[in-house]
Image (tube, helix red, strand yellow):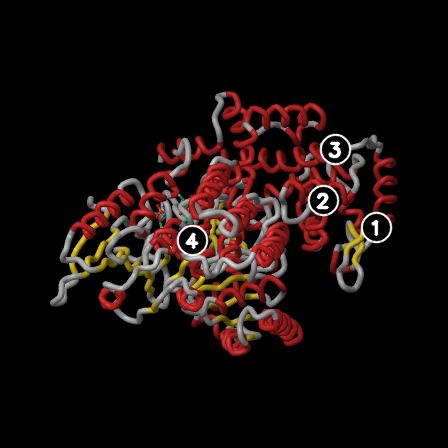
Amino acid sequence: MNNLVKISRDKDKDNDVAVITIDNPPVNALSPGVPEGIWAAIDEINSDAGVKAAVVIGGGRTFVAGADIKEFGKMTSGGPRRSLLPLLLRIEDSSKPVVMAIHGTAFGGGLELAMAGHYRVASPTAQVGQPEVKLGIIPGAGGTQRLPRLVGVAKAVEMCADGKPVSAREAATLGLIDRLIEGDLQAGAVAFAREIAGKPAPKTRERAEKLGTAAENAAICAAARETAGKKQRGLKAPLAAIDAVESATRLSFDEGCQFEAKLFTECLFSNQSKALIHIFFGEREVAKIPDVPKETPVIPVNRAAVVGSGTMGGGIAMVFANAGIPVVLKDVDEPALNLGMGKIRKNYASSVQRGRFTQAVMDERLQMITPVLTYDAFSEVDMVVEAVFEGMALKKTVFADLDRACRPGAILASNTSTLNIDEIAGATSRPEAVIGTHFFSPANVMRLLEIVRGKKSSKEVIATCMSLSKKLGKIGVLVGNCRGFVGNRMFGPYRREAQFLIEEGAEVEALDHALVEFGNAMGPLAVGDLAGLDVGWRIRKEYRHLEEPGIRQPFSEDRLCEMGRYGQKTGRGWYRYDDSRRTSVDPEVTALLRKWSAEAGIPQRQISAAEIVDRCIYALVNEGARILEEGYALRAVDIDIIYINGYGFPAYRGGPMWHADTVGLQKVYQRICEFHQQHGELWAPAPLLQRLAETGKTFAEFDKEQAAAA
Ligand code: 3H9
């Protein structure tokens, strides 16, 4: 044993149950030393005649949350399997029965450890799961072999392929948990251990009653492969996980473990796994703001308000209501407010219909939203999010009103997606209370929240918004106040290149297809149609005076807008849509594009999918590098998190900056230099990219250097 694993005796009179406590905060990961400590504890109880049974429990807030992910990058072969697999056999072969006592989470290697015990008991609030696919790997310590033996092949395939946890209650009905323990888990587990002591101890690896027939399993696995192909398009690990679970039904336990090991190792050393692990840590890193320490006081947000009940405002009101925060929703007149509330009701009703939650939950959430026409109730709220039309004059009027209506100390946030937060703050007498909270559409679904720091936003206001984002189920990323902030500023060059390519001869559908094949959720033109082409058109008109003369500008989208083709909402945009929103290529657009390009004198040519991807994705990378150097994003990983959670960038590529690192920055830089020569100044390489490429460094190394210097 060591300081990570402790052994003690239960306190009651018999003193015959040993309690093995794993104590490796914060989540009891199976870091080096933990498997060794458990092994020594199992040896000790086996050689102690006074011990009849043992309980393994996690110290602190959880059982074991899995293998130590930080160790994965250091692995040269096989990873933590080498210490875990033999340990699990050792536990299963223990002559004294071992009861695993689960609270918090038993994830990944944690659940694999639990399944090697002879029995499992759990607190009703615990969760168990094999989330490895989310890290681009599969269970590697026998999970794909023991889980189907306990819960059957269908459930094991589901749990290993989609990675979602199941509650302890469900696990109990599945046979994965033997008893739920209300109250003191350790006391309940010890009592349970005493009940089973002396009885035959079942070894999971020797059980076969739930493995089913080959024919049943073939159909289950085929259906799972089809689902994974659609829902986790492009990801390799879910398919490997299905193969591994299926092997349990045709191979012996030992052979199945060897097969699992081969697939685990292939996944562990893949680019997909490296990218997904980068995202796992990145999602936690973005919460760390160098000059806003963890201890910064936060303002309790118990009541909120939203101004504007349009698509965004209504969605934001739902976000507060869903998190249990009462919210007043204001609009200018009855018809607008009724329309907004109607949309919210429809939205909730469709969730009830799909079985996401019950009618009672819907009613409760609706009651949290109070529609209002005046600012009277605003004196009671702790935070307001303004979500009116995107225009500076209107925003300033609203903020001046808020300044009068809200109590001192309330946070005044704007959902602007492009406008200057400092200028908006200037309309109030309290710029320190003003901040941007840029939600993404649909606000109640998308995880990203860009939190825009104004020059005078106070640290308390920043800390509150960062911590609130978690409560609202969002991932908050702090960004600086530049035009379009981080996400939309990068999206500009990306969509610009998409239009240029179309104007140079690429087909509408071929362009979107190339980027969907790359892994993006949707192509840029289809995204434009979904969001409404008129949104960008209005913004471009507002900023037209800033365009530099003599620099090529795309024109096709503006022309479509001039014709009233705004996208899905008008039935026509880049594509044509029928009443049920089925999409088809519009020959009229193809003809118009050829005509407009000929008039503009743009030579037409065949454009490959590879060029489409390079032009669009490297436009993101180049702008991302500028943003990073100018300090509007704190880290390259922040940009990656923004793109994955707000713009449908494939997580298995790790975000645009990580993707560029993976391709190699020299290669990316060279390609950008070629585009610079061919297409002019818009492609001038970002100085940071040039510097990193020339010194053989990566964006990830840049992040590390910046952190070390801070
Ligand atoms: C695996 O097990 C493979 C097996 O098949 C074995 C193969 C041989 N390792 O999320 P939080 C850190 S793969 C290292 O903010 P929460 C995390 O980075 C693994 N570190 O807390 C953070 O650090 P910091 C399968 C880990 O309460 C701190 O702990 N398991 C690990 O919101 C707190 O984390 C998983 O995929 C880890 N395994 O959520 C589970 N886990 O404070 C991954 C966390 O420095 N973990 N950290 O930023 C989770 O899902 C959540 O952390 C959990 C707690 C739900 C457990």
The x, y position of residue 41, in whole percent, is: 21, 49
Q: Residues within 10 Å of mark 4 (few under 14, many from 20)?
A: many
Of residues 240 and 572, the one drawn nearer to the viewer in this rendering: 240
* Label 4 within 8 A of ligand 1 by Cβ: no
280 displayed left or right of 5: right
C-alpha distance separating marks 3 and 2:
12 Å
Q: Secondary structure at mark 3?
A: loop
**Residue at the disc numbered 2:** 512
C-alpha distance separating marks 3 and 4:
47 Å
Of residues 256 and 177, the one drawn nearer to the viewer in this rendering: 256
Which mark is first along the chain, 2 or 3?
A: 2
Which mark is first along the chain, 4 or 2?
A: 4
- Residue type at mark 4: give it: Arg
Which mark is first along the chain, 4 or 1?
A: 4
The x, y position of residue 351, in whole percent, is: 59, 69
For residue 615, what is the image quadrant?
A: top right
Question: For residue 608, which numbered disc appears in the image?
Answer: 3
Which mark is first along the chain, 1 or 3?
A: 1
Q: Secondary structure at mark 2?
A: helix
**Residue at the disc numbered 4:** 146
